[in-house]
Image (tube, rainbow, N blue to C red):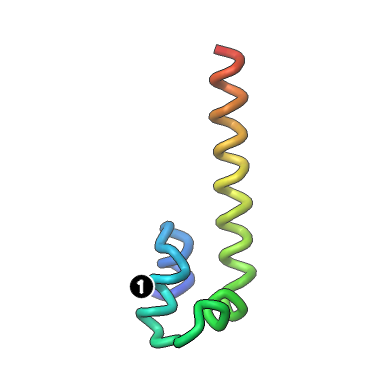
Amino acid sequence: MSISRLIAHGIDVVTVANILGHSQVSTTDNIYAHIIEAERTKASECLADVILRRKQG
């Protein structure tokens, strides 16, 4: 499994940094920023959907 797939499957950036041997999490965050941001956006959209559905129901 590629590193980007780990992130896409919800593995946190600290764990990914440890797997890669990065001494600074910011290194991992910078390298995989586009994937991490896409996953954060999906999570935010999911949370908004759950909150809105709960208010409507």
9 above or below 35? above
Q: Tell me what residue is drawn at x 59 percent, y 80 percent.
A: 31
Locate residue 27: give its quadrant.
bottom right
Q: Position of residue 37 (x, y in %)?
A: 62, 61
Amino acid type at circle 1 is: Met
Judged left or right of residue 12, residue 29 is right
Badge 1 local density, few (<14 within 10 Å), some, or many (20+)?
A: few
| Quadrant the N terminus occupies | bottom left
Which residue is denoted by mark 1 in the rendering?
Answer: 1
Front residue of this view, candidates 3 and 28:
28
Residue 26 as seen in the image, left or right of residue 19: right
Residue beneath the point at 43% across and 71% down: 14
Query: SS class of the residue under badge 1?
Result: loop
Number of numbered discs? 1
- Rendered view: 57 above or below 20: above
Q: Residue at x 41, y 74 (%)?
A: 16
Rendering quarter of residue 39: bottom right
Query: Residue 23, percent across and down?
Result: 45, 87
Q: Quadrant of residue 26?
A: bottom right
Relative depth, front residue between 9 and 24: 24
Q: Is residue 14 above or below residue 20?
A: above
Quarter holding the C terminus is top right
In the rendered structure, the answer to whether residue 23 lies left or right of residue 49 reads: left
Q: Position of residue 36 (x, y in %)?
A: 57, 64
Name the residue: 43% across, 57% down. Answer: 10
Q: Residue furthest top?
A: 57
